[in-house]
Amino acid sequence: MPASVTKTRRVAVLADSDTRWKWGALTANRIAQEDSDIRLDGYLLRGRATPTARQLQEVGVPADSLREVSAVEFLRTMARESYDVLVLALVGGGVQAMLHGLKRVWEGSAERPVVVTGYVGVVYEKLADGLLLRHGADLVLANSRQDAERFRAVYEGVGADASSVTEVALPFLGGEPYAGEHDPYTVVFAAQPSVPDSRKDRTYLLDRLIQHARRHPEREVLLKLRSKPGEHTTHIEELPYQKLVQRLAPPANFKLVYGNMGEVLDRTDLLVTISSTAALESLHRRIPTVVLTDLGVREVLGNHHFVGSGCLASWDQLDEGHRPAPDEEWVSRQGVCADGTYATAFDAARERIAKLLERPGGLPALTPYYTPATAPGYLPGILARHHLGVDGSPLPGAPAHDREPGPVRQIVRRAARGAYRHGVQRVAPVIRRMGEL
């Protein structure tokens, strides 16, 4: 038997929420060379949105190891561990802090991993801010042709190197194409934690969903939820639909569901949302998909991103049986790959990573656009939130994480996180209502 030529790539993913873990871990698998295995080590950045065990199980992307870390602890780990690829699946400020911290811990060494970052889904707000905070990574992944063009334009417009921008697709697309109506016909509303954010708007959407279930008793109407009360996702959810529905009396064909979005889409005949990335998953599988206009087409909702998609419609239209037809040109520009090209969507990223790993003399130092010289009034605050100084080193008084936390410290952390979530979901809304009196 010939000797195996399969290589094992060591890959680390640092994520700060359940959705970013899903994006980061799946991206790590997508960008791996076809002739290699990967050892995937997961690191969960400690914070308000650190995923629970249930959320990680629901995401369904396993890792060879997985542990919770602070920013300082992660940087110390990167100083002593050897990886081929590092995926930073963080909010923009977190990426920027890690880039500066990593630049310091790898100073003087060309032996470092290829650093990859990007966005979980649709980029419809804070384009320049988020992009410049991610500048400095070896690859900044763009989930579509449209995003790649916009990303390069921003970098070139401020005089920053745009060569890191690499077009890929959303890493969590997949599943069988839609093959026709199920029995029963199933309508799924994909809820979002922060869109819309007012009680009035969320109650309106819930009422319309329940009305649709009453109007069509032969259909199964599902409210797909991202998290259970007390859990946090990428965005804070102050008014969970689970609590709002307790005051209503939905019919028997209306149900709340959790679980993997792909499994829910397996039985979906009509996907309805305000602006969830689930719409792109649905379009990839050619499931009839609606982006609601009931609350307007507005940047604050994110549904403005779907202008030109052919998917915009209202509940009145859906109640009357409307089935949208997506615009094929729009779909092809969004990284949806409904045309069957998904298998090759990550080829450019794989090729770029392979060349960087084979670069003679190793990799150069990380060079973020933001420095103490270019953003002296902005950068220090971003780094300080992760207990880092402007040179990327830990600030005096930063929590010591040179050893694993003991049981007492773990209990205190869990209690503090629970208190924070209680404050966000229970206390803060009450205070705001009192302020409106």
Image (cartoon, rainbow, N blue to C red):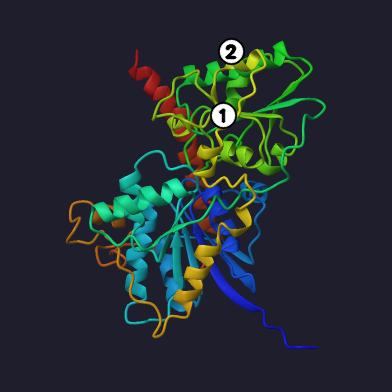
Identify the image quadrant of residue 178: top right
Q: Is residue 305 above or below residue 401?
A: above
Query: Badge 1 is on which residue?
Result: 273
Nearest the eye: 238 or 226? 226
- Mark sitting on residue 18: none
Q: Assess disc 1: are there few (<14), some (14-19) or many (≥20) residues with their C-alpha within 10 Å of its C-alpha.
A: many
* Cα distance in 3D space between marks 2 and 1: 14 Å
Residue 95 shown left or right of residue 81 in the figure: left
Q: Is residue 164 above or below residue 327?
A: below
Nearest the eye: 187 or 235? 187
Q: Quadrant of the N terminus?
A: bottom right
Identified by mark 1, the residue type is Thr
Query: Badge 2 is on which residue?
Result: 316
Q: Nearer the viewer, mark 2 or mark 1?
A: 2
Can residue 385 be seen at all in this image of the molecule? no
Q: Is residue 374 above or below residue 261?
A: below
Q: Residue furthest right?
A: 183
Nearest the eye: 326 or 23? 326
Q: Is residue 354 above or below residue 130?
A: below
Residue 17 shown left or right of residue 64 in the figure: left
Q: Residue at x 25, y 55 (%)?
A: 379
State the image coordinates of residue 202 (x, y, percent, origin top left): 52, 21
Can residue 239 be seen at all in this image of the molecule? yes
Identified by mark 2, the residue type is Asp
Identify the image quadrant of residue 262: top right
Label 1: element kind: strand
State the image coordinates of residue 395 (x, y, percent, origin top left): 29, 63
Q: Quadrant of the C terminus?
A: top left
Residue 8 shown left or right of residue 72 in the figure: right
Q: Are marks 2 and 1 in contact (CB under 8 Å)?
A: no
Label 2: element kind: helix
